[in-house]
Amino acid sequence: MDAILFLVALFVLALFLGVELITKVPPTLHTPLMAGANAISGITIVGAIVAAGADTSSTLVNALGFVAVTMATLNVVGGYLVTNRMLAMFKRKS
């Protein structure tokens, strides 16, 4: 029970810290930070592939791994599409 309470407290602390950090970032830096976060999110795909390809007898683990790969890929691709759209706003119009 203590471990769960510790994890919940850590999550709440991270939530408040994240909100404070994001509100202090000027709008001109949001695009580079978002691109970097998308690159780091690629690590999630690697972990999901490892979980999906694990040699376990449980089909539930393999199914959850497949769902994780799918969702992580959608997250990264969507993040890059949004970043590309944001960068297009800064291009000069001819």
Image (tube, rainbow, N blue to C red):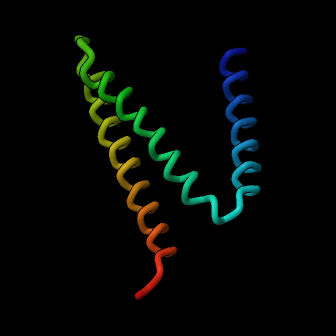
Q: Residue at x 30, y 41 (%)?
A: 70
Q: Residue at x 27, y 16 (%)?
A: 54
Residue 5 occupies which quadrant of the picture?
Answer: top right
The quarter of the picture where the C terminus appears is bottom left
From what the image shows, is residue 30 above or below residue 20?
Answer: below
Residue 84 occupies which quadrant of the picture?
Answer: bottom left
Left or right, residue 27 beside residue 44 = right
Left or right, residue 88 beside residue 60 = right
Q: Residue 1 appears at what percent x and percent y?
A: 68, 15
Q: Residue 30 appears at what percent x and percent y?
A: 60, 59
Q: Residue 77 appears at what percent x and percent y?
A: 35, 52
In depth, the one of 42 and 69 nearer the eye is 42
In depth, the one of 64 and 33 nearer the eye is 33
Q: Residue at x 42, y 33 (%)?
A: 44
From what the image shows, is residue 9 above or below residue 39?
Answer: above
From what the image shows, is residue 52 above or below residue 80?
Answer: above
